[in-house]
Image (spheres, rainbow, N blue to C red):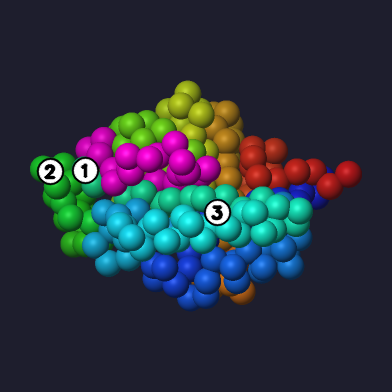
Amino acid sequence: MTDYRIFADYHTHTSYSHGKGSPRENVLAAIEKGLDRIAVSEHGPGHFSFGVRGKKLAKLNGELTELKKEFEDKIEVLRGLELNVMGFGKSDCPADRDDYDVIIIGYHKSVPPFNAYARRIWGESLFGVKNDPHMNAECILAAAESCRANIISHPNLYLKVDIPYMAECCRQLGIMMEVNSARVTMSEEEIRTVKKLGCSLVIGSDAHTPSRVGDFKLASDAVTEANAWDAVKNARPII
């Protein structure tokens, strides 16, 4: 069986939101792990509890710009953002979206329900009110397409989605689906289905401390069980 090396971690957090440690510490941890790329992808401004916005977001982006220059001969430092689904087809995408190297989007609980469908999915995620997985996928996909997202984070977390439908749409849109290594949110069969439908996967640590940057074990094990490594776009075969 071919072995693979994961060369990039696109999903990490810092003390700018609800993580610990600084962007610099994440970068240094990524270098120590032998990664080629590292992104800091804090929660977008719409997250009620952890959203990074205004001057704080500008300060973070400035810090990442400086780190990119400082470590350009050791690692590629990327400016990321993990956007929040705010309603059907709506997100907290910033006006300067093109200034970001990596845009991740996912459903999170701590966002204000701005329209009727948002209130429905908010009710499901918080109170277990049953909803339609197909429509949930539609909601997230419409938001992802609108903001030209690169990655959908942790599918099925907080909100059950129609994985085959999401995978088919993501394939058409060129969006990757994340196998999250903080908690794997898709079953082995679902990961296998994503691959079968031709959708790209990406493994993210979802690190909230520097020590977890580049920690891909849970996701790697799940991808191995699903025999889906050839669908993972941030991994290369070890020759």
Q: Which residues are magenta?
A: 88-106
SS at badge 3: helix
Q: Which residue is mark 1?
A: 87
* Amino acid type assigned to the residue bearing label 1 in the image: Gly
Q: Which mark is residue 65?
A: 3
Magenta-span inclusion, residue 93: yes
Magenta-span inclusion, residue 94: yes
Task: Looking at the image, tell me whether mark 2 or mark 1 is earlier in sequence order.
Answer: 1
Depth-wise, is mark 3 or mark 2 nearer the camera?
A: 3
Question: Looking at the image, do the residues carrying marks 2 and 1 touch, with CB atoms under 8 Å apart?
Answer: yes
Q: Which mark is residue 115?
A: 2
- What is the distance, in whole Å, between disc 2 and disc 1 at their CAs? 6 Å
Q: Is residue 89 visible?
A: yes
Q: Which residue is depicted at the point 76% across and 60% down?
A: 34
User: From the viewer's perspective, is residue 33 above or below residue 144?
Assistant: below
* Amino acid type assigned to the residue bearing label 2 in the image: Asn
- What is the distance, in whole Å, between disc 3 and disc 2 at their CAs? 36 Å
